[in-house]
Amino acid sequence: MEINHKLIDSSKVQFREYQVRIAEGVLNNGNSLVILPTGLGKTIVALLVIEKKLLEGKHVLFLAPTRPLAEQHQKTLSSLLKIPEGRVVLLTGTTPADKRAGIWRDAFIVCATPQTVENDLRAGRISLEGFGLCVIDECHRSVKRYAYTFVADECKKKGVQLLGLTASPGGKKERVEAVTKALDVTHIEIRTETDLDVAPYVKRLETNWVEVELPPEFNELKEKLEEVVSERLEPLMKMHLINTTSPRIPKRLLLDAGKKLVALPDSNKLKFVMLSHYATAMNLTHALELLETQGISAFLSFFEKLEAREQKSKAVKRILEDMRIKWLIRKANDLRNNGEHPKLAKLVEIIRERNGKKIIVFVQFRDQIKRIVDELIAHGITARQFIGRKDGVTLKEQKETIQKFREGEFDVMVASSIGEEGLDIPSVDSVIFYEPVPSEIRLIQRRGRAGRAKSGEVIFLITKGTRDEAYYWASKSREAKMKKIVKGMQSELAIKKFFEKHLGRKEQEAVNLKPGQAKMTDFF
């Protein structure tokens, strides 16, 4: 199939063969999920599909999870498409209600957040009549009750083709299936860094694992706190909510235990007693994680916040009244003046070795960000924090920080999860994980900030013998699993289409697999 480029300014974009092939697959196969590593042109694939729909006289809806990302797409499409000015429109919650209907009617492409579109659809201000395509960026969010799901359902009712874009739909089959179900996917296009048609365009990304060891005084605190954590996990184990009292219990197991407790009827007398024990265990495992991976100040700050609460729950009182916890807090205060977590000194060392390079440091815990920035500045490093609007930073301030980073006003950006997606942050030389994250989605998004335009580097700071190690391997394992799951689903969809095309639906039903029956893809 030949893709027409009448509406695309070819002087501004070069199409790669795999992008054209993926776009052809989408146009030929209905609702599609496109999975491409960050920096390999998911937006260009969407652009090719959008052009075809516009040439057919259809309108296009382009959804993004955040307003800055929706604005970025609006600017990109306006720049690359040869269509009348003002026909690629950014629709936000601040757009006057009386103007919305006209915008929807006159725009060729509407870029918006799903919440904005959902509100307009529910209010009856707009209709999806005349729309032929809905592009859903970061579509791994299109699960559960997120607004993406509502808009996708409305598109399905109107026969609007759905195109989901993501770098990672998730590392569990149930999560990937939830995404494909939400978008009613009948076709999957996936490329990894090793695929032959993609490999020539992948920039080399060097990965380094930098280990630090906790000093003896840290280990003493850690061991004492582990004893308390194990004891506080015992009530949950006795209720068969968890199967271990190890202080290194995976957080997901604790979260699952919490879901089981919440699901119990209120008439169950043990429910609220066990919820209190659960809250105690969660708070203490969090404190242990802060001590292991962040340091004394973060550890003490957590307990200071608990102490400052005007209304303290039974769980919080149980923690603060524990004599062992009081001893740990006194000991930690004695140690605070003797130095922070060894990661901080190692981070300074790593950045100074890369003098003048553009670096993003991702930090899991927001309270640590200012502390890290202050330490870097104290060592003569130009650094700035990058945090979200939940921390009182406006969108305008975020954009100003990004622009100053792009212009070289400072070299190091210390970011919370806000830096993972949704904002036009320039490519950097190095991405540093102050601590590994167990999520394969966050791993892929953070790593994708390096090596877009040139070779880059990813560095993981890992404390030996702590959950840092477990989180690192968990995210790597889930990423590999995600690729295997999606490749398998891609093959299953292709086999299903083959049967539907060559045997007909009745024959296809006759060969449907029974539970537990081997699939053809099991043998590839």
Image: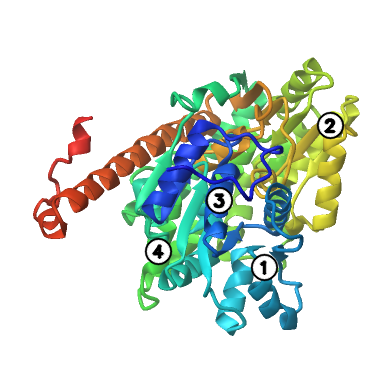
State which mark lies toward you, 1 or 2. 1
Amino acid type, mark 2: Glu
Residue 24 seen anywhere in this rendered image of the structure? yes
Q: Please name which of the two marks, 3 or 2, marks the residue nearer to the observer.
A: 3
Three-letter amino acid code of the residue under disc 1: Ala
Give the Cα distance between marks 3 and 2. Answer: 34 Å
Q: Which residue has dot 4 on it?
A: 261
Question: Residue sitting at 90 percent across and 34 percent down?
Answer: 409
Q: Which mark is residue 138?
A: 3
Q: Are marks 1 and 2 in contact (CB under 8 Å)?
A: no
Q: Indicate the secondary structure of the residue bearing disc 4.
A: helix
Q: CA distance from mark 3 to mark 1?
A: 23 Å
Mark 4 and mark 2: Cα distance apart in space: 42 Å
As drawn, the label of residue 107 is 1
Q: Which label's residue is closer to the chain start, 1 or 4?
A: 1
Query: What amino acid is at disc 4?
Result: Leu
Measured from the top left, where is residue 65 in percent x and y?
61, 57
* Residue 30 x/y as whole percent: 39, 55
Residue 4 sits above or below residue 87 on the image: above
Earlier in the chain: of badge 1 and badge 2, it is: 1
Q: Amino acid at mark 3?
A: Glu
Numbered badge on residue 375? 2
Residue sitting at x 78%, y 36%: 413
